[in-house]
Amino acid sequence: MESDLIIIFFTVALAHFLALLSPGPDFVLVVKSAIKNDRSKAIGVAAGISTANALYIALCLIGVGAILASSVSLMIALKIIGGLFLMFLAFQALRAKRSSYAELSIERDEQKSGETSFLKEFVTGFMSGILNPKNLLFYLSLFTVVLTNDVSQTFKIGLGIWMTTVVFFWDTAIIFLLSTNKVRSKFTKLAYYIDKLTGAILGMVGFSIVKSAFAK
């Protein structure tokens, strides 16, 4: 049984990490925050995203995720709300003027008062993670297909903690990479265009999610 648990762990861990390597709305938000905010505030996005992931993992562990996934109306509502939220973020990015990026520099210790905060970034990351129906379906598929009743709840919880931790440290690693002077200097010079590109991506993803909610 111990060897089986090792196989299950590496199977789930590999599938989870490969999913992280695939850029999605959460990844885009991490990049946006990293190039626009100092490290201490940008980490709020990573914390929010990982918290949302932890909540979905917990729901799947106690069986609520299966109930949500089986309810067509709830899933449709989740898709619509999530898609509209991403489209709202896209609208904010696309409407921003070039002058809004004038304050970006390679090294920053302070942000203009009221511009953002760790809490605001946390809420943005959490909302992105919790309103993305793909997150729920991804974790639900992992816990229902790979894990069986023969696997102890302790192992499942440990696996959930592992995945939550990996999400946080992966996003934090991206933030730290973009906060180094050499990398950040290149990104900040292109910040205006990067923000427009990521905004367009968020808008398209959000639109596709809303569209899929009305698809038969």
Image (cartoon, rainbow, N blue to C red):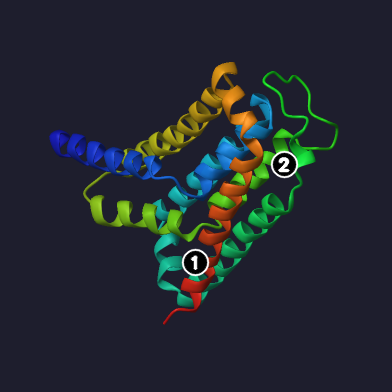
N-term mark: 2 or 1: 2
Residue on which the image places disc 2: 120
188 with respect to 65 (left or right)? right
Q: Is residue 162 visible?
A: yes
Residue drawn at (24%, 36%) of the image = 10
Disc 2 from disc 1: Cα separation: 26 Å
Residue drawn at (49%, 70%) of the image = 75
Camera-side residue of 21 and 137: 21
The amino acid sitting under disc 2 is: Lys
Using the image, determine if residue 41 lies above or below residue 65. Answer: above
Camera-side residue of 184 and 50: 184
The mark lying in front, picked from 2 and 1, is 1
Name the spot of residue 156 as percent of width and height, x first.
33, 43
Residue on which the image places disc 1: 208
Name the spot of residue 159 as percent of width and height, x first.
35, 38
Say which element carries label 1: helix
169 with respect to 150 (left or right)? right
Residue drawn at (38%, 52%) of the image = 139
Q: Circle 1: is it few (<14), some (14-19), or many (20+) Cα within 10 Å?
A: some
Q: Circle 2: is it few (<14), some (14-19), or many (20+) Cα within 10 Å?
A: some
Say which element carries label 2: helix
Which quarter of the picture shows residue 122? top right
Camera-side residue of 208 and 94: 94
The amino acid sitting under disc 1 is: Ser
132 with respect to 84 (left or right)? left
Which quarter of the picture shows residue 154? top left
